[in-house]
Image (tube, helix red, strand yellow):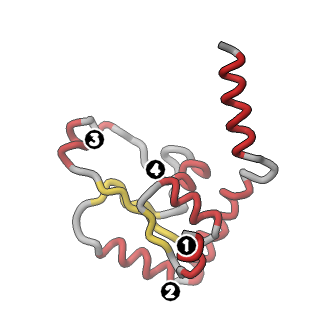
């Protein structure tokens, strides 16, 4: 919720949509996507080269570029790396400031756009061109 994001020093997100919402608030974060090993291996995860899944990372750097938001994807195992990342975002002013600056770059890409209106126009264009 808006109030929880506003109150937080840092955020632990578990959804791609949420990462974009948190970015709008310029709150430092990390994200996690838990996956079942058997599912990943059975679907050919081992041949995938995609590195980024969170929307701020995808918007800024595409599928394989550097991450502005640390993602634990897929995640299984100890929570220690996640705790360390969140603690560093709280205690390391330089790291936190850099992530906020990177988030501002994500938001700048939406300046001058009305996503709702543009999405509605895209749908109408598809409908009109059938």
Q: Earlier in the sequence, mark 4 or mark 2?
A: 4
Q: Earlier in the sequence, mark 1 or mark 4?
A: 1
Marks 3 and 4, Cα distance to the nearest angstrom? 16 Å
Marks 1 and 4, Cα distance to the nearest angstrom? 17 Å
Marks 2 and 3, Cα distance to the nearest angstrom? 35 Å
Residue position marked by numbered label 2 in the rendering: 91
Q: Earlier in the sequence, mark 3 or mark 4?
A: 3
Answer with left or right where residue 75 lies relative to residue 54: left
Give the position of the C terminus as an image quadrant.
top right
Answer with left or right where residue 111 lies relative to residue 84: right
Residue position marked by numbered label 3 in the rendering: 46
Give the secondary structure at mark 4.
loop
Q: Earlier in the sequence, mark 2 or mark 3?
A: 3
Task: Please identify the residue farthest to the bottom as the structure is shown.
Answer: 91
Residue position marked by numbered label 4 in the rendering: 53
Q: Earlier in the sequence, mark 3 or mark 1?
A: 1
In the drawing, what numbered circle is on residue 86? none
Q: Taking 95 as reference, is 46 above or below it?
A: above
Task: Please identify the residue farthest to the right as the structure is shown.
Answer: 112
Near-viewer residue (92 or 28): 28
In the drawing, what numbered circle is on residue 28? 1
Report the residue at 42% width, 43% height from top.
Answer: 50
Marks 2 and 1, Cα distance to the nearest angstrom? 11 Å
Give the secondary structure at mark 1.
loop
Near-viewer residue (73 or 3): 3
Q: Taking 94 as reference, is 115 above or below it?
A: above
Mark 2 neighbour density, 10 Å: few (under 14) some (14–19) many (20 or more): few
Give the secondary structure at mark 3.
helix
Marks 4 and 2, Cα distance to the nearest angstrom? 26 Å
Q: How many numbered markers are drawn?
A: 4
């Amino acid at each position: 919720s808006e109030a929880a994001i506003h109150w937080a020093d840092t955020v632990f997100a578990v959804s791609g949509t949420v990462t974009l919402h948190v970015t709008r608030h310029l709150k430092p974060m990390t994200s996690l996507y838990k996956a079942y090993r058997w599912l990943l291996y059975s679907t050919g995860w081992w041949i995938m080269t995609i590195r980024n899944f969170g929307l701020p990372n995808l918007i800024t750097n595409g599928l394989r570029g550097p991450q502005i938001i640390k993602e634990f994807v897929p995640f299984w195992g100890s929570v220690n790396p996640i705790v360390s990342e969140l603690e560093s975002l709280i205690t390391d002013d330089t790291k936190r400031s850099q992530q906020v600056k990177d988030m501002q770059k994500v938001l700048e890409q939406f300046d001058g756009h009305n996503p709702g209106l543009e999405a509605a126009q895209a749908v109408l264009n598809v409908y009109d061109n059938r």
